[in-house]
Amino acid sequence: MIKARIQTTLALMTLSLCLTLSANAAEKKADKKAEKKTDMKLFVVNTSASSAYWKGTKVTGFHEGHIKIKEGTFEILKGELSKGTVAIDMSSIVDEDLKDPKFNAKLTGHLKSEDFFNVEKFPTATLSIAKVEKIKAGGENTHQVSGDLMIKGMIRPITFPAKISITGDELKAVATMTVDRTKYDIRYGSGKFFQGLGDKLIHDTFIVKVDLAAQAAK
């Protein structure tokens, strides 16, 4: 009888110890999650203070202009940019080098057409940032950014350098991306797909320079 009581008492003590250890482990796990959540801040892009510049080149020259940032958010983890998303309004693309209104409208309309960005069907391009690494070597750029760029509904990986600074609740980022349009099935005037284009050949790559400002979400 006494032996049975001792065994029962030991079993209860063991059960109590297991429950205590389990509760402590769960509490520590919850604390780590809370700590991680506290370390992460959400920043929202200020579209009125941000801009995107584009430039495309061809055999006979180039065209350039601006396009509007639609929206964007960044996740800041322990004071560093971790990931984010920036959406661009493709329907807002404008050319700024052609001064003749007729030729300007013709070029802008062509860029919006199915030959290029088909903005009626694909009104938004999206940059999704998945990885940000500090650049050790000195220079203007401070980070290497990797992620995905979606144009015309097609998603392709992209990596580019950027200058990123975070001061308190303010973020500023400047980056220039080189984009190969043929990866997004934009073949018009491309020497990869058409021969004998002569001075009508359009280079496959174009650049997009973004100047972004963001603030911590309230």
Image: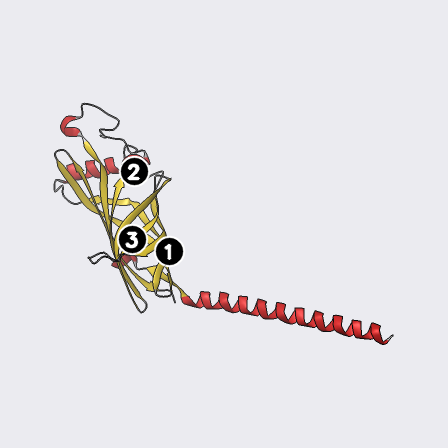
**What residue is rendered at 29% in x and 52% in y?**
69
Is the image coloured rainbow, by chain, by secondary structure, or in one colour? secondary structure
Splitting the image into 4 quarters, where does residue 201 fall? Answer: top left
Q: Provide residue 177's location: percent of width, then percent of height.
A: 25, 47
Decide: is 200 above or below 17.
Answer: above
**What residue is rendered at 67% in x and 72% in y?**
17
- Closest to the camera, between mark 1 and mark 3, is 3
Q: Amino acid at mark 3?
A: Gln
- Closest to the camera, between mark 2 and mark 3, is 3
In the orientation shown, which residue stands out farthest toward the top?
196
Decide: is 188 above or below 125.
Answer: above
Q: Is residue 14 left or right of residue 156?
A: right
Point out which mark residue 83 bears.
1
| First-in-chain label (1 vs 3) | 1
Callout 2 secondary element: loop
Quadrant, the C terminus: bottom left
- How many angstroms separate mark 2 from mark 3 (CA)? 27 Å
Q: Amino acid at mark 2?
A: Phe
Point out which mark residue 117 bears.
2
Q: Provide residue 136's location: percent of width, then percent of height.
A: 26, 58
Callout 1 secondary element: strand
- Closest to the camera, between mark 2 and mark 1, is 1
The 10 Å Cα crowd at callout 3, few under 14, some 14 to 19, many 20 or more, is some
The 10 Å Cα crowd at callout 1, few under 14, some 14 to 19, many 20 or more, is some
Q: Provide residue 106's location: percent of width, then percent of height.
A: 20, 36
In the orientation shown, which residue stands out farthest toward the front?
3
| First-in-chain label (2 vs 3) | 2
In the orientation shown, which residue stands out farthest toward the right?
1
